[in-house]
Amino acid sequence: MTRILPRLQIFSLAVVLILLLLQTLLRVIFWFRFNTPDDPIPANDLLWSFYLGFKYDLRIAIYVVLPILLLGWIKPLHPVHSTSGKKIWLRYSAVAILMLLIVYAVDFGHYAYLQQRVNATAIRFLENPLISGAMVWQTYPVITGSLILLAIVAACMWLLNTLHRRIEPIPDRYNRWYKKTAVVMITIVITLFLIFGKLSQYPLRWSDAFFSNNAFAGQLGSNPVEYFANTLNFREETFDINETRKHYPLMAAYLGVDKPDIEKPNFRRDYHFNTVAGHKPANVVIVFLESFASYKSSLSGNPLNTTPNLQKIADEGYFFKNFFVTQTGTARSVWTLITGIPDIELNKTSSRNPLIVDQHTIINAFKDYKKYYFLGGSASWANIRGLMSANIPQLEIHEEGSYESPTVDVWGISDLSLFEEANKVLKNLNDPFVAIIQTSGNHRPYTIPEDNRGFKILTQDDLLPHKVTDYGFASVEELNSFRFMDHSIGHFIKLAEQEAYGANTLFVFFGDHGIHAETGKHVRKSEAQLAIQGLRVPLVMYGKGVISRPAIFDKVASQVDVLPTTAALTQTDYTNTTLGRDLLDTRFDDHRYAFTIEHSGERVIGLLSDKYYLQMKYNGTGVSLHSLESDTARDDISAQHPDITQTMTDYLASMWSSIQYMRENNKQHTTKEYQP
């Protein structure tokens, strides 16, 4: 058969195939060595783990070959035409294979020791190299293992060298400039595609490996080189145990910890509800409302009457008017709700951090409930799939590609369609369920579908004498998008109440975050001056079969309080190990605060009460106190209120150290749900 590929591509392909063969063999060995016969991976999941693993391995092989492809065209560095080039790239390949084998060897040892793939936290062992070295020497066959690694490298080099000698020149009829150009372009396209990893809006990510409810399937599908590299980005976020212990007594009292332990700090609280015989468990539907700032809604007194549907269910349920998220950003908001821990990750988001993806969540207290996550777009966004799947067993994810409704823009199907699709699933269920619905349409390009169930698009003339820019909106398009979200909420509630499940469901609506923009004439000046308008969002709980008497609450409420309050309202026994508290538990009403954090620049953390906002840098410096009732709220009034400043500073410092500790010590396997 006539060969038409250039020698450079053939040599590179040979290196890729050797690396793929080697990594596949190591994955098979990993499976045989560490799988649990009593809890085997289902056959379909096993095949998918190997398939994903192959794609990760292929990406690593491509990364290794990239320098050869980029530099090999230079004559002195050509791996076939040049003797010096051949020596350079054979030695480079030998070093790359050796380094790969070392990572795998460390990974095998790390997993055998900790049941975790090797990650950046392993670098801590280098802080005491003599002790760590002695442990390795005494535990593992270092000499034998090293000889085996060198033998494998030698075998790979023999195979590559043999293939190298058999690479023949291309016949002249194929050696034309336009054919060379075509080969180069095809090589570039294929290389980029293999690095990206899949035909999707999002590339192949570490979280894609955690698709199964079987934890070992995710471990098997992961590639240790890529996994380790990803965790390096998150290595510096950690806690100081001395600071945690210093502040622990105050935080334990604040949270109502059952059995405080300052030596090994725990934040566990167990709650049990004595339900009457025949009690039917209530369903739960939690809805994230994209960019749903309070000041834009009718609930804030906005004269544009933007959210009549949400206003109606707030009037018939519970409305928390002083509810705050910890920061802006949808991915951070999802993390905070699921875990009860504010997202303090500096550079990216905690949902993207594989080191802390394993978290206990109150959602799992809803035992024997079916669990669903509905999103109009892709759950690969911000690695939300990994966060959800890794922590909520048997979670059923519905995302783009699984709906009958058409995609309307970059965010997937419209929010109206999303609610309809969710209702199609929920109305056919006989078992109790928890459903999380993640809206995303209240974004540019502000798409409103033609099939919108009677929604009326307004113009500026319809709003006279008001101007949208006077009441928190940058444009009429943004206003209509916000109104369409409310229209979709009303449509969803109407659909739900036509079905059997609607009579026994607690609906929880809240904004994933607000918008840092001009708030309008109807909102007090401190909101914009202190950038609170991006944190204050509506929290509305509604359910005729769950809430017997409507109420409006002035108490300060935080996003971390949502799940504890939801469990309490539905009389679900639960264990809480993080920051949130039941908003209906009056024991805590004397000290209600909302933690905030601003990541841009030097991180600033804050504490909101009903009257004040205390801020300080994360290292404890730059403390300032601000009045929420003042028209000059940026003024620091800490000198005028030293006692309030000190009290709030103590609570803020306690929360900060506790949050840092919680995110690394809130593991599922160490936290079992309350058993009455």
Image: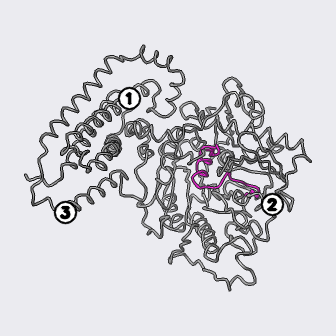
Question: Which residue is farthest top?
Answer: 138
Position of the C terminus by quadrant: top right
Dots 3, 2 in contact, CB < 8 A = no
Asked whether 602 or 69 is in front, the reply is 69
* Quadrant of residue 324 within the rendered picture: bottom right
Residue 343 among those drawn in magenta:
yes
Residue 583 seen in the figure = no
Asked whether 325 or 59 is in front, the reply is 59
Residue at numbered disc 1: 36
Residue 151 screen position, x and y as percent: 25, 24
Compared to 586, does 467 lie above or below? Answer: below
> Judging from the image, what secondary structure is the residue with disc 1 in?
loop
Three-letter code, disc 2: Ser
Residue 403 screen position, x and y as percent: 43, 63
Magenta residues, start to end = 318-344
Residue 71 screen position, x and y as percent: 30, 48
Measure how far apart labels 3 and 2 are at the Cα level. 68 Å
Residue at numbered disc 3: 177
Is 322 left, or right, of 75 in this rendering? right
Three-letter code, disc 3: Trp
**Of marks 3 and 2, the one in the foreground:** 3
Residue 502 among those drawn in magenta:
no
Is 84 left, or right, of 330 in this rendering? left
Compared to 94, does 288 lie above or below? Answer: below
Three-letter code, disc 1: Thr
> Judging from the image, what secondary structure is the residue with disc 3 in?
helix
**Of marks 3 and 1, the one in the foreground:** 3
- Mark 2: few, some, or many residues within 10 Å (few <14, many ≥20)? many
Residue at numbered disc 2: 526
Residue displayed at 47% across by 64% down: 412
Residue displayed at 45% across by 29% down: 115
